[in-house]
Image (cartoon, rainbow, N blue to C red):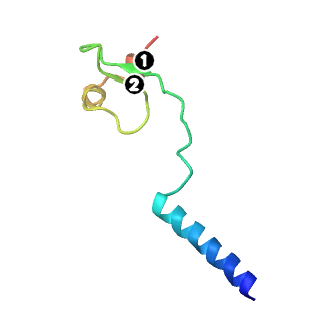
Amino acid sequence: MSDEKTKLEERLRQLAAGAVAGPSHQRRPYPKVLPKYRNPKNLSETWAGRGKQPRWLRAQLRSGKKLHDFLIK
C-alpha cells in the first residue's frame, strides 16, 4: 500500500508541475497564405480571400464590380 501511495503522490506532483507550466503542445503550423486580390487604387492593399472582406473590396463590390476583377494574375 505504501508503494502505491508513493507512486500516486509522485504522479500527482508531476501533474501539478505540468499544470503550472501550461500545456506542452503548440499550435499546428499553418502555411503562409499568399494574397489573391489587390486593390487597383492602392497596390499595397491585398486580401488572401480568408476572413472578412476588407472595406476597400466591399465598397468596390457595392459599386457593381465583380470579385474576379481584383484577382492577382
The residue nearer to you, when weighing 47 against 22, is: 22
For badge 1, the amino acid type reads: Leu
The residue nearer to you, when weighing 34 against 14, is: 14
Q: Name the mark nearer the viewer: 2 or 1.
A: 1
Residue at the location (56% across, 42% down)? 28
SS label for mark 2: helix
Count of marks overlaid on the render: 2
The residue nearer to you, when weighing 52 against 27, is: 27
Residue at the location (40% across, 39% down)? 51
Q: CA distance from mark 2 to mark 1?
A: 7 Å
Give residue 5's position: percent from left, percent from top: 68, 84
Q: Is residue 21 left or right of residue 39?
A: right
**28, above or below 69, in the image:** below
Q: Residue furthest bottom?
A: 1
Residue 60, picture quadrant: top left
For badge 2, the amino acid type reads: Leu
Residue at the location (56% across, 50% down)? 25
**4, above or below 47, in the image:** below
Residue 37, picture quadrant: top left
Give residue 64's position: percent from left, percent from top: 29, 25
The numbered dot on residue 71 is: 1
Dot 2: few (<14), some (14–19), or many (≥20) neighbours within 10 Å?
few
Quadrant containing the N terminus in the rendered view: bottom right
The numbered dot on residue 45 is: none
Dot 1: few (<14), some (14–19), or many (≥20) neighbours within 10 Å?
some
SS label for mark 1: loop
Q: Is residue 10 left or right of residue 3?
A: left
Q: Is residue 66 left or right of residue 13?
A: left
The numbered dot on residue 67 is: 2
User: Contact (CB < 8 A) between labels 2 and 1?
Assistant: yes
Give residue 17's position: percent from left, percent from top: 52, 64
**68, above or below 30, in the image:** above
